[in-house]
Amino acid sequence: MPTTSFTTPFIGREDELARLTRVLDRARAGEARAVLVAGDAGVGKTRLLAEAAGHATDVGTTVVTGHCVDLGDVGLPYLPFTEIVGVLADDERFSAALASHPVVDRLLGDGSGGAGDAGGRLQLFEGMASLLTDLAGSAPLLLVLEDLHWADQSSRDLLRFLLSRGILQSRVRSIRSRGEDAVAGGTPGQRLAVFASYRADDLHRRHPLRPLLAELVRLPVVERLELRPMPDGEVARLVRAQQVAPLPEATVRRIVERAEGNAFYAEELLAATSEAVPGAASAVPSGLADVLLIRFEQLTATAQQVLRTAAVAGRRVEHDLLRDTVRLPEEELESALREAVGRQLLVPGENDTYSFRHALIREAVYADLLPGERVRLHRAFAGVLAGRGHRAESAAERAHHSRESHDLADALAASLEAADHAGRVRAPAEELRHLEAALDLWSAVPAAARPEGFDTVTLTLRASAAAAHAGETHRAVSLTRSALARVGNDEDSELAARVRYTLAGNLMRIDNLAAAFTYSNEALAMIPADPPSRTWVWAAATHVMAATYMGEGEAAHRVARKALRVAEELDVSDAQADLLISLVGLEGHSRRTPEGRARLREARELARRAGNASVEMRALFNLSIGSHESGDLDECLTWLTEGLERAGRAGLLSSPYPVEMRYLRSLMLYTLGQWDECLRAAETELDGLPTAGRYAIGPALSVALARGDEHAAERARALLDGPFDWMATLVAGLLLTDAAVLRRDAEGALEQFRTTLAALIDEAGTTPHVAVRLAALALAAIGDAAVESRQTGDKEGAGRWTGTGKELVELARVTAAKGEDGTPQGPEGLAWLARAEAEWARAGARPDGGGGVELSVGAWEKAVAAFGYGDVYEQARCQLRLAEALLGAERRDEAAAHAGAARDTAVRLGAVPLGDEVERLIRRGRLAETSSTADRAPVLTARENDVLLLLSRGRTNRQIGEELFISGKTASVHVSNILAKLGAASRTEAVAIAYREGLVEPESSASG
């Protein structure tokens, strides 16, 4: 039977579909079963049943569907079963079976089924059971009943008979009559499954389906499957799958937030977004609002009044607050609430609260209010909240209601109270929102009505700090510029200096370095160094950072040493910490060195004792990035974990340094080959990322790109939307260059390389370290083009690409030698330099092969070894090229070994494009005929070899961690990687393989 057709891919619900599939498999084996599928309207019941029906059809099961329809109190009896019989009657395959069953004529004749009396009903019920039994006897049968909540009484009675006494129970009776031995001997039971769906949110307390469901779920052959709201990540995938062009992440995030796991709501919101005029208000789409208001309009007038009042309160409302605002007698209020709860519009919660079942229901009810009605109800809520006194939890609500009711003076006072509370509980985004509301209201409130002790400059400075902590860096800059415009030349010089150095700090976060240097210089000049003051120390600390970025190292060092002495004298320990961090780079003890990281740990401790979480975040970030640049990925993960835990406690997860740490943690997961965990981290953290931190999903996009996701490049390009961001430009540039490499688009890769590099070079003309990686990636595409040109005899093209390749490899060499700050490259940078050299050897190979092949082999061997610091994917890509070079040198055994290792990694990571390329090389070079790579030892990193040795000595993860000075969790990650590479199912098996392959030597026993 045909099933419903859908244009979008099936997303999510894999577990639920697997459960239905298992029921179908059991039914095909003769074990009849029924599943009652429950879920709210729009949650995906129909789509799930369609997918299950499609699976059933594919394996030879007959699928027939009947729909219940909402016809009010005068519904047609047996409507879904009449539809089922009608569909069967139209199919010639079943004509013989249907001809022997009178129930067919009774259902299709006059629509009543001839069931006017009890005897007639019983005959019809038994006839329907007999028909389905015969059909299931000729082929497996799936009966689908949709929308049982609209089923008429007769259909409910027939379903009760079929499930409790009819088709599903026949096998039970046959077991009892024949005995278990007969069944075990192979006598088939009913090859039948029944799937029936209903809307859980339509079942009010007195709904007639409720008693039937309670009865059916007690039957041993009936099970209930509840479809809960989809996880946010799956809703986001659903939204993206319906759009050809990529949507901005902010749009996807907003749709996901409002849909709350409901697929239908998400689709309607997406359609409204696509049709909306840019800048239009984000209201509930009219068609969706009509659907949402259907149950609301079925309420009594009093219940509607209570629900309208609750909608003004928001998604959730306290019982006492609602009671005091609606002003109904207690019994009437309780009756109205009981009705709204029974209709599944409100849901009782903890602490005597009620919440709308779905946020969009609340939005639809609120939008349906008249303008005057809204103002009146908001005023009532504000009055009740004001009567409760200055409670912190009420301030934000009171500010909202006062503003909506046009009491601006009270809205201003409440906004400031709410900002104070948000600051105390470390909620910077909320603090920013309340402070901006206060600033908006300031000029509209008469001076006499404003709270005392506040002024717009200090409020704006405070708002800019909240914006920076919330990760809204461009907003922080805008607010500080606003403060600068408000502070006049005659104002207090200390306040003016604070504004300027705050602006300088915010400008550095958006990489506007020249302007930052100008403002930090002005701030330092506005206040004297003598007598010493905290303001001068912080102005100096900010200027040191700005001067360092601008290449003014000598001046920065001089100011830093002086400021450090003053900070020590005044005991401003957080400023000491900030200056120590700056001095790590200025005095040659870079964060890559043990000495440098020791000073960073000292700075971290000073900041921690001072309670300055922002400076502590800077220290922890430098500790983690220093470990990463040194190739110590274990230490890096340790600092990242500690830093992000501290940021979470301080409410700073969205501020710049923690966002960079979140990116770095994802990068570590990607580098170490833990790709599924990398994707999960991106899905769970996406909602918490500020707009300026979107680049943190870059490693997850790298996974998608390496796995062949055709949309990954467009999502990477979306990172470039909005104001310029240095990190977003870097991440997008790497992704888009690599995407061009995978497309074998040399022109595109070269153009992306040049565009990205031009954007990343700062005002001082410094070429960043990442230029080495960008050059290596672009050289890969250039190498492909050069090889192809030589193979096709295009000497001019080969020469052009060789010349371009030489230009890029020279840039990589110079950048690696000089560095962006004079420090040498770490293991990662050296690995990319080795890759650039190897790609150049491939691109510039001599056409006669004289010495060029061995040169290429040597270069790729160095690249493979260099990525052994821990980057499993890049090492595998280099192994592919090494195998290719070895094949050209007729070293087939070695070529087969490296090709096999690259293939194993590609399979483990799910890197399909790489795997396909390796398979093509194996086929082209007939490497499968060479000795099997399965008999060869896999390539382990140096750290994995250390762990494997301790593993062979029986150490636990904790003991391994203690001996190698890493965490037990990190040791566990290494053990998992070793098991995967060795193809072992347990630690014992891994050790056995290691001994067999010679990866570890047995310990010699001591002679006695």
Image: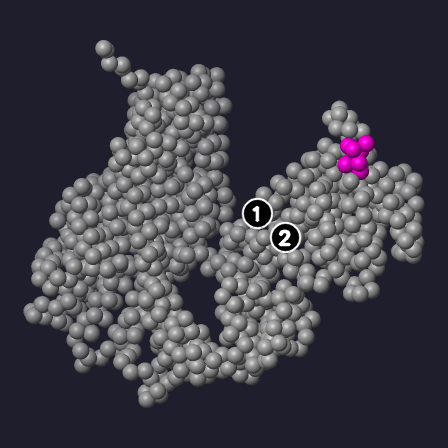
Q: Residue at x 17, y 50 (%)?
A: 602
Tell me: 501 left or right of 116. left
Q: Amino acid at mark 2?
A: Gly
Q: Is residue 171 magenta?
A: yes
Q: Quadrant of residue 444?
A: bottom left
Circles 1 and 2: CB distance less than 8 Å? yes
Describe the element under mark 2 as helix, strand or loop. Answer: loop
- The image quadrant of residue 789 is top left
Quadrant (top left/top right/bottom left/bottom right) for the N terminus: top right
Q: Earlier in the sequence, mark 1 or mark 2?
A: 1
Q: Main secondary structure of the magenta part?
A: helix
The residue positioned 69% from the left and 48% from the top of the image is 217
Q: Which residues are magenta?
A: 170-177
In the rendered view, would you say 172 is above or below 11? Answer: above
Q: Kindly identify which residue carries mark 2.
A: 44
Q: Position of residue 565 (x, y in %)?
A: 8, 59
Residue 635 left/right relative to 924? left
